[in-house]
Amino acid sequence: YREQALKLYPWICGRCGREFKSSNLQMLTVHHKDHDHDNNPPDGSNWELLCVYCHDNEHQKLLEAAQRGAGATASSSGPPPAACSS
C-alpha cells in the first residue's frame, strides 16, 4: 500500500507540512487513519502520509489515550496497539 499511497498523494507530511524528494522519501510513512492495517481501500481514503516524527507522535497520542482510558487497570487491558510498519 505504500507505493500506491505515494502515487496518490503529494510527498508532503500531513501534519507538519514538510516536503519530501526521492532522496529522503524513506522518511515519509503511511499512517492508517483508523489504525486498521488491513483496511487498505484502493482510493487510499484510510491513508495519510506522515513524516516519521509526526507518525511516531500520532501513535504516542493513541497510546497515551489508551492508558488514560485504562486507568489503574492498564495491566489487564492487553497489549497496546501496534505501530504502523511503514
Image (cartoon, rainbow, N blue to C red):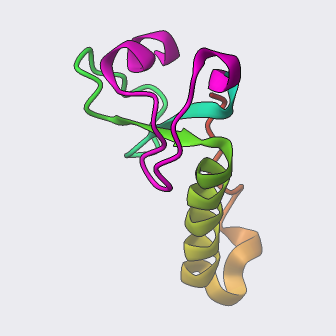
Quadrant assignment, res 21: top right
From the viewer's perspective, is 68 left or right of 33? right
The percent position of residue 63, horizontal first and vertical second, equals: 63, 65
Labels in figure, total: 0
Q: Quadrant of residue 80?
A: bottom right
Identity of the residue furthest to the right in this view: 75
- Give the side of residue 68 with respect to residue 11, left or right: right
Q: Residue at x 42, y 47 (%)?
A: 14
In the shown orientation, is residue 48 left or right of residue 75?
left
Q: Image quarter for residue 77?
A: bottom right
Give x and y (percent) for residue 51: 60, 42
In this picture, is 24 found above or below 54? above
Foreground of the two, 30 or 39: 30
17 falls in the magenta region: yes
Give above or below for 78 relative to 11: below
Q: Is residue 21 above or below residue 45?
A: above
Residue 58 is covered by the magenta coloring: no
Q: Give the range drawn in magenta.
A: 1-25
**Is 9 on the left-hand or right-hand side of 51?**
left
Q: Where 49 sits versus 25, above or below?
A: below
- x and y percent of residue 68 in the render? 59, 83
Residue at (25, 32) in percent of width and height: 45
The percent coordinates of residue 2 (x first, y second) are 51, 17
